[in-house]
Structures are given as C-alpha cells and as structure tokens.
Image (tube, rainbow, N blue to C red):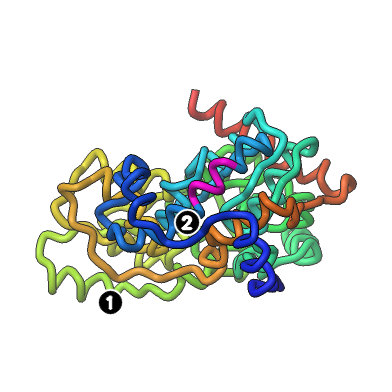
C-alpha cells in the first residue's frame, strides 16, 4: 500500500502543488475540455498536478494511456491516449515512448507490458485491481476445458496475464460477438463475465456459448426495474447499457455497447436526455463534447478505477516506481491470445 503521507511530503519538496486560481486561468485551454463538469475552483486544485505531470512526461519520454472510466482531470488533463480496452491494447504496442503510465486497472498495465515488453510500464497504484479479473484463474480455464473438450476459450481482456496465457484468444466488449462468431467450433467457452457471455449468446445464436460465473461489481448492480423507473420519471429518456450488465438490463436499454461504442452512439444520435448504465466517469468525460445532451443518473463508481489519482500518477513518474513485470513464460502465450484478438478484429473490420 502506498504511504501517501511520505509521498505528499516528497512531492511538495519538488513541485509547487498549492491550489492556484492564477495557474488555473493560465491553463484554461485544458480546463475547457471538462468545464461542464468541473468548476474552476476544483480545477485550481488539479492544475498544479497537471502542470507537473506534463513536464515530467517530456523528461521521461512517457505517454499516459487512460481508460474511459478515468476521472476528467486524468482523462482530459494529462492523457495522451484515451479509449476502451481494445484501443488501449493496440496503442500500447504502437506508441513511441520509453515509458507507459497506465491509468486504468492492473490487467490493463499487464496487457501493455505483454505487447510492449521493451517499455517500462508504470501502474500508479498496484491495488487498482478488478473484481472481474480476480474471479478466474488459469486453473478455472483448465476446469472449463475439461467440461467442454475441444471448445476454444475466449477470455475477456479483463483478466490476468496467466488467464490470457491459458486462453486461445481474447476479446473486449466491443468485439466479443464477432470473435465468438468467428471461432471454428459449435461450442465456445467465454470467461470470466457471465453477463457479457449471455449477451453475446443472444447475438450469436449459431454458437453454443458456455461461461464462467464471474461478473463486474459495477455493472451487475443495475436492474431492469432501475431503468423502467427512470423512464417513468423522465419520458423520452434514452438509455445506453454496457454489455457487462445482466441481459434483462440490456434488453430494457435503447442501445448496448462498449465504452467506445457508447460514446459514438451519443455523438451520432444526440439524444436530448440520456442515461449511461455504466461507470460514472464515462458521462463526465463525454459531456463537454456533447453540450446539447443532458446526462442523467444512475451510475456506479468503480472503486478500483478511482484509486488512480493525479497525485499517484505524479508520484509514479517522479519516483519511477510501480513498474509492472510479466514472467516471459507467461507473457509469450498471453501475447499470442491478445494479438490474435487484434489481428482478427482488424480482419473482420476490413
């Protein structure tokens, strides 16, 4: 666990991190990207950290990869690449940098290291895990293979390197249905998200999809009744669900898709009122680009994603600690599973 008391003392000895309305005004171009959800008084607190991080990125030849669930001050303030898991996985291998700072959760940093073993990959907080990734092990994959001999294993990227290495191919919520449909088998094993698997099974009826009993703590909390209640309270409301939600929630929504597809749907359809049934930061991060859209609750916060803060990002770049390593014996088969996903996704898209 990070000792924040010592970290704060060390950082303040090297950087001016006092809140400053003057600096906030000087950095108003960055604030404009998140002005709808962040008052200037809050930006005055974050701006000194953003300034320090931007300077350190240049010194370290570093890039910051930020998932769509990061807070606005990270997503809009310091990131070089933003997106869903698939986009970040691809960019991790493409970026020209010595250092990658992964603003997301631990399995994402592992994926970056798997695809870019020559780069230093920093995780600002090693305790930023994932309930879904922790729900399955390589032993669990072996159990599923024993139950369904010969069936290929399609594992969500929200898994550890060991699980990826034990799988045939990976998928994301954006490409899961296409990946499963492309498998040369009547039966396909999906791990570890049972809800994503069940939603995919509805999209790919020609396959027998079987699944591991895992779920995301953010998305499994939503119910179909939640959505019906909000429709009653807000006639005309459009509801978008993430496919990690239970099937009855997805069925109640107007649209279901990955974080990247959610953003694209909002920008294309421009609904007057919309509710995003996913992690809370998602709406905050796309609201300024869609000023004519009113974003309504409910949403759930991911406690793991929220562990990544500007303070911790600054510390990781200052101290160069929190480097993620993957055993080469695990990294190689894991890389094959991830690369198969990337290659197949590109083939299906083209």
Residue 70 colored magenta?
no
Answer whether labels 1 and 2 touch (C-beta < 8 Å).
no
The foreground one among 340 and 209 is 340
Assign the magenta stretch its main secondary structure: helix
The foreground one among 21 and 279 is 21
Q: Residue at x 76, y 45 (%)?
A: 334
Above or below, 56 relative to 275 = above
Q: Evaluate whether residue 224 shows in this view.
A: yes
Residue at the outermost left position: 235
> Residue beneath label 1, please?
225
State which tag comes first along the sequence, 1 or 2. 2
The foreground one among 179 and 160 is 160
State the image coordinates of residue 191 (x, y, percent, origin top left).
64, 59
Check disc 2 and report its element: helix, strand or loop.
loop
Check disc 1 and report its element: helix, strand or loop.
helix
Magenta segment, which residues? 50-55
State the image coordinates of residue 100 (x, y, percent, origin top left).
66, 42
Residue 183, label in figure: none
State the image coordinates of residue 326 (x, y, percent, origin top left).
82, 50
Residue at the outermost top position: 350
| Quarter of the N terminus within the rendering | bottom right
**Number of residues whose C-alpha sits closer than 10 Å to that of mark 2, classed few (under 14), some (14–19) or many (20 or more):** many
State the image coordinates of residue 74 (x, y, percent, origin top left).
47, 52
> Residue beneath label 2, please?
70
Q: Residue at x 68, y 43 (%)?
A: 112
- 22 relative position to 95: left or right: left
- 281 relative position to 94: left or right: left
Q: Residue at x 35, y 62 (%)?
A: 42
**Number of residues whose C-alpha sits closer than 10 Å to that of mark 1, classed few (under 14), some (14–19) or many (20 or more):** few
Q: CA separation, marks 1 and 2?
A: 28 Å
Q: Which is more foreground, mark 1 or mark 2?
A: 2
């Amino acid at each position: 666990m990070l000792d924040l008391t010592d970290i704060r003392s060390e950082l303040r000895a090297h950087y001016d991190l006092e809140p400053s309305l003057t600096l906030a005004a000087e950095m108003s171009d960055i604030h404009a990207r998140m002005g709808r959800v962040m008052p200037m008084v809050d930006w005055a607190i974050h701006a000194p950290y953003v300034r320090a991080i931007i300077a350190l990125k240049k010194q370290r030849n570093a890039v910051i990869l930020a998932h769509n669930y990061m807070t606005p001050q990270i997503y809009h303030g310091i990131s070089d690449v933003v997106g869903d898991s698939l986009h970040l996985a691809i960019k991790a291998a493409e970026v020209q940098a010595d250092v990658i700072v992964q603003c997301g959760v631990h399995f994402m940093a592992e994926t970056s290291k798997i695809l870019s073993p020559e780069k230093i990959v920093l995780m600002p907080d090693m305790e930023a895990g994932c309930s879904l990734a922790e729900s399955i092990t390589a032993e669990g994959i072996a159990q599923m293979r024993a139950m369904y001999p010969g069936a290929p294993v399609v594992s969500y990227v929200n898994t550890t390197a060991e699980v990826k290495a034990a799988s045939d191919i990976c998928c994301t919520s954006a490409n899961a249905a296409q990946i499963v449909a492309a498998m040369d088998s009547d039966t396909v094993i999906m791990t570890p998200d049972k809800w994503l698997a069940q939603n995919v099974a509805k999209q790919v009826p020609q396959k027998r999809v079987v699944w591991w009993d895992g779920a995301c703590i953010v998305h499994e909390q939503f119910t179909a009744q939640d959505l019906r209640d909000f429709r009653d309270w807000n006639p005309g409301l459009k509801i978008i669900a993430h496919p990690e939600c239970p099937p009855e929630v997805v069925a109640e929504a107007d649209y279901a898709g990955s974080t990247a597809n959610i953003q694209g749907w909002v920008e294309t359809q421009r609904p007057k009122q919309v509710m995003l049934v996913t992690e809370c930061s998602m709406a905050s991060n796309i609201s300024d680009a869609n000023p004519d859209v009113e974003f309504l609750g409910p949403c759930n916060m991911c406690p793991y994603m929220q562990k990544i803060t500007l303070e911790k990002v600054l510390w990781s770049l200052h101290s160069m600690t929190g480097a993620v390593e993957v055993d080469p014996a695990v990294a190689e088969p894991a890389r094959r599973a991830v690369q198969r996903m990337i290659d197949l996704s590109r083939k299906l898209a083209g």
